[in-house]
Image: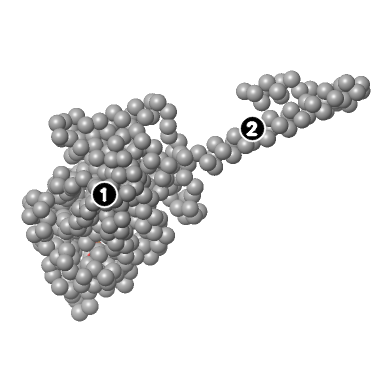
Amino acid sequence: MLQMKHIDNTPSTPGKFKMEKSPYNRLRLHSSLAKLTFWSIVFLGLIFVFFYRSPSSSSPVTSDLNRRSLRTNFYGGPAWEKRVRTSAKIRSRNGISVLVTGAAGFVGTHVSAALKRRGDGVLGLDNFNDYYDPSLKRARQALLERTGVYIVEGDINDVALLKKLFDIVPFTHVMHLAAQAGVRYAMENPSSYVHSNIAGLVSLLEVCKSANPQPAIVWASSSSVYGLNTKVPFSEKDRTDQPASLYAATKKAGEEIAHTYNHIYGLSLTGLRFFTVYGPWGRPDMAYFFFSRDILKGKSIQIFEAANHGTVARDFTYIDDIVKGCLGALDTAEKSTGSGGKKKGPAQLRVYNLGNTSPVPVSDLVSILERLLKVKAKRMIMKLPRNGDVQFTHANISLAQRELGYKPTTDLKTGLKKFVQWYLSYYGNGKKSAQ
Ligand SMILES: O=C(O)[C@H]1O[C@H](OP(=O)(O)OP(=O)(O)OC[C@H]2O[C@@H](n3ccc(=O)[nH]c3=O)[C@H](O)[C@@H]2O)[C@H](O)[C@@H](O)[C@H]1O
């Protein structure tokens, strides 16, 4: 406004300046020019501060990350803060208030909805990147919106945003599910794994360690940390130092980073090793999802096999079972012990397998899908590529059973039936299909 006023008082054409002859007028001209320069500098300075220093805009790390729309939206203001508070408000006795990162993701959406249903306060955070079709993430967001969960659009690397959220809400828990997922994509875009799964985790833990009170954190690790292990079923005590993909390596690094923040700052940390989670509202980059799409379209699908026609199998785990495991982990998490960034005593540090305990060959998965979709798949058997995939996974879940009350109840046939029902209702019979 100031600038506008100043410009209004300034002669509008250079010709008018030339006509001013008296020393008094020259003095006025100099003074006007000086004012104009001064206010221009002030105005440019304000623009610079607004765009480059605003806590609401995270600086893009690389052009690639930029492409994947990781920049955050603007936030702030009383109406926005009210939305944040209302969403995070606890509505049941003994409820908890949880910041769910990756809330527009597959597991994040289901966990957020389940917490909200039982009366906990839930605030979502998601950067809505385009690793897979963002419209699916928007649809999940709309679903959560209807249950009263607000998702703040922002990146976990945006420390200023995270601090602001903790200033507004004293979260008791963080359910950290934001990550760069997918085993094979790590060869295409390695930096996105470092950005989300390592830098993002550290930025979140930095804010959590300084928060008062410190929250307890439950976060998503992965079955892939077992890497090239051949001893089955995989137990939490087994070695995890032979990751087969960069994805696995970043999840393993996350477990070590968790150890450090627990040790130095007294943060309560629980890592959950998810085993190939599937179900309605799932991730289109996962095999069961794009197999369904391609079978319906009559496109051929590649089914991997190991050397000497060895079976490739996964301990596929249904989303509702995983949600129960996540809630069990949140409910048994002890408080962090630090405050003001200082540890006051030893804190809980846990890792659990959340699997189904019954691996199924990928070819059987395809047979189940064929029956449910009533379409024969065009199968192409391929040698397991050297791109990070492991031959099999199989979880020993006795620790989670004992300590979290985790007990999966959904077999692959039942779970896929629910997935296919959802898929057909969401995309239609292959006419409108997943990207
Ligand atoms: O447990 C985990 O921690 C991980 O689970 C998931 O990884 P995966 O178990 O590899 O699932 P997914 O890609 O669906 O492949 C399933 C099977 O199909 C085989 N597969 C795959 C593609 C293909 O074209 N053909 C094929 O046979 C393939 O060889 C495999 O045997 C998550 O994506 C990952 O983010 C992480 O959470």
Q: Would you say residue 295 is visible in this rendering?
A: no
Residue 379 position (above or below residue 143): below
Quadrant housing residue 11? top right
Q: Residue furthest bottom?
A: 308
Closer to us: 56 or 390? 56
Q: Would you say residue 310 is visible in this rendering?
A: yes
Residue 245 position (above or below residue 206): below
Residue 398 position (above or below residue 113): below
The residue pinned by badge 2 equals 43
**Disc 2 secondary structure class:** helix
Closer to us: 261 or 225? 261
The residue pinned by badge 1 equals 344
The percent position of residue 277, horizontal first and vertical second, equals 20, 54
The percent position of residue 302, horizontal first and vertical second, equals 27, 65
Residue 307 position (above or below residue 112): below
Sort mark 1 into few (<14), some (14-19) or many (20+) by Cα contacts within 10 Å: some
Closer to us: 93 or 276? 93
**Disc 1 secondary structure class:** loop
Residue, x 71% and y 32% (percent of image)?
38
**Left or right: where does residue 16 sit relative to residue 155?**
right
The percent position of residue 78, horizontal first and vertical second, equals 40, 26
Sort mark 2 into few (<14), some (14-19) or many (20+) by Cα contacts within 10 Å: some
Amino acid under disc 1:
Lys
Residue, x 17% and y 57% (percent of image)?
352
Residue, x 49% and y 55% (percent of image)?
62
Amino acid under disc 2:
Phe
**Left or right: where does residue 98 sit relative to residue 365?**
right
Residue, x 24% and y 47% (percent of image)?
336
- Asked if disc 1 is less than 8 Å from ligand 1, the answer is no
Q: Residue furthest front?
A: 344
Figure quadrant of the N terminus? top right
Mark 2 → mark 1, Cα distance in angstroms: 48 Å
